[in-house]
Amino acid sequence: MQRDSKIFVPTGDFILRAGDRINIAASHKDLERFFRMCGALKDKIKSVMIVGGGKICYYLSRQLLSLGMRVKIIEQNYERCKELAELLPKAYVIHGDGTDQELLQEEGIDDADSFVAITGIDEENIIMSLYAKMNTGAKVVTKVNRDSYVDLASQIGLDTIISPKYITTSNILSYVRSQSAALDSNIESLYHLVSNKVEAIEFKVRENIPGVVGIKLASMALKKNILICAIVRKRDIIIPSGMDTIEIGDSVVVVCKEHRISELKDILE
């Protein structure tokens, strides 16, 4: 959970405040029920408007089209428009300037379920996204390359920000970290979250671990800023309470801050 610039791994007595940004661990079914109870469940996205026709646009559009979505692409370079039209025959490809508000209106931004700004210019992406967020009900996604702009975009209300540089760096770090740890541990996968300030690690429990296996979570002597957020037992996903236990054969997802965890036993004081 993030509050301003501070990161928290919340305990049971933590109190949420307006403006907090939270990460939720849940099965798809439970997550849908949670958003429905909160009144935040929206209709499925059926149409997407993308501004910027680079490589990311191509691969994203191909995936969206395969899911049956309607895709409209706006690109300034005429030759690139012809290429995209050939590569993506089911997409609508428009030759024009995505920063032109009149063009966006003419091309139906008001009817789009999602608006994606992925040109090569951060400032344009931010401006277009702000316009879409303030004037439509579309889900807005913004690509930002410069590190200094990521926090800025978040502060001005753009809540879905994609940074290719950060994603690439995070994936490399996660791979190197998990591979080096896997030499002598039971780490299955590792992910960096919240600007690399938090790690989510999946362990496979292959043997008895004193103080962990068969012990109720409420009775474990966990280190500070450690959260056991999921237990996968056969095909069942368990979002654990204090009364649940970890058993041999389980996969366990641990979220941690300020710790370098290489073994599941490392979560204990």
Image (cartoon, rainbow, N blue to C red):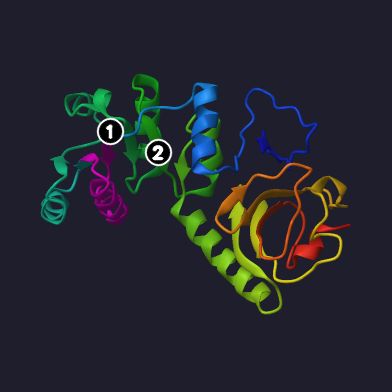
Name the residue located 11 percent from the left edge and 50 percent from the top edge: 89
Which amino acid does the dot numbered 1 rest on? Thr
Check disc 1 and report its element: helix, strand or loop: loop
Residue 257: image location, x then y, percent? 73, 51
Which amino acid does the dot numbered 2 rest on? Val
Please tell me in which quadrant of the rendered image residue 179 appears: bottom right
Please tell me in which quadrant of the rendered image residue 99 appears: top left
Determine whether 50 is above or below 208 in the image: above
Neighbour tally class for label 1: few under 14, some 14-19, many 20 plus, Cα within 10 Å: some
Determine whether 174 is above or below 112 in the image: below
Residue 2: image location, x then y, percent? 66, 37
Name the residue located 80 percent from the left edge and 64 percent from the top edge: 265
Name the residue located 27 percent from the left edge and 34 percent from the top edge: 46
Please tell me in which quadrant of the rendered image residue 21 appears: top right
Pointer 1 or 2: first along the chain: 1
Determine whether 147 is above or below 19 in the image: below
Check disc 2 and report its element: helix, strand or loop: strand
Q: Which residues are magenta?
A: 46-71
- Left or right: 134, with 39 as reference point: left
Residue 123: image location, x then y, percent? 40, 39
The span from disc 1 to disc 2 (Cα, nearest Å) is: 15 Å
Residue hosting label 2: 141
Locate the C terminus by quadrant: bottom right
- Left or right: 231, with 104 as reference point: right
* Mark carried by residue 99: 1
- Residue in the foreground of this view, choosing between 157 and 175: 175
